[in-house]
Amino acid sequence: MTAETKDKLAERIAKRRAAIEGQGGDAAPAVPGAPEISAETELQPPNQDVELAITRAREAMEAGQNPMAVARLLGEVVGRGVKNKGLAAALGKSEPWLSKRLGLLSATVAVQRLIESGELAESEYHNNRKNIKSGMKVSAGALKYQRMPTITINIEAARSLAAILQELAEEHGVAPVKFEPGSNKKELTSILNYRAGEILSLLK
């Protein structure tokens, strides 16, 4: 901590104590040898530490690191007292996107290991959560996952399904499905893999 930072912190502490005394309150007695820490410092982590944690999470995302590694970094930021809304805004993401990433931290240890090893795709975990357990196998002493079979449809059918999901999302007031008639294969695959199961659950 620089001398300038210490001076500013001391100034804030002095102002806080003056305010307490002005309201008739008594400042807590100092403990000999203990560092001087204000209530503000205890309740609110230093901004530079929070910013560093957010930067680490952003860099991990941009580098395409494993979803579990990203989830743990995001969890560290939230653990520092940052609200989901503020963190999502800082990352340029939506709150539902952030909730999904943080949701990985609630998965069982076995599932987290599968995602970490690359055996289980994050998208499959979100879309096929109910059947994940049945796909987990132990082979040669290692935990494996038997992936869900896939099918192939043409791009026009995919666009039609995405348009239906878009209307249903709007009708039920959930996070909008970002779909345009000219959406490419990658965008359509993401919509169908990530949003279909979520929106289907709203119709039950």
Image: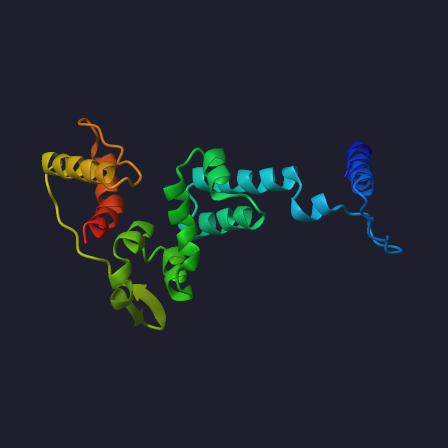
Question: Nearest the camera: 203 or 130?
Answer: 203
Question: Nearest the camera: 53 or 121?
Answer: 53
Q: Is residue 58 above or below residue 99?
A: above
Number of numbered discs visible in the structure rendering? 0
Residue 203 lies left or right of residue 52; in this view the side is left
- Where in the figure is residue 101, as x and y percent of width and height? 40, 48
Question: Residue shown at 82%/47% (left/top)?
Answer: 36
- Where in the figure is residue 64, as x and y percent of width and height? 41, 42
Q: Quadrant of the N terminus?
A: top right
- Where in the figure is residue 62, as x and y percent of width and height? 44, 37
- Where in the figure is residue 148, as x and y percent of width and height? 21, 57
Question: Nearest the camera: 92 or 175?
Answer: 175
Q: Quadrant of the C terminus?
A: bottom left
| Outermost residue, right side | 32
Question: Residue shown at 79%/38% (left/top)?
Answer: 19
| Outermost residue, front side | 24
Q: Indicate the quadrant where residue 155 lies.
A: top left
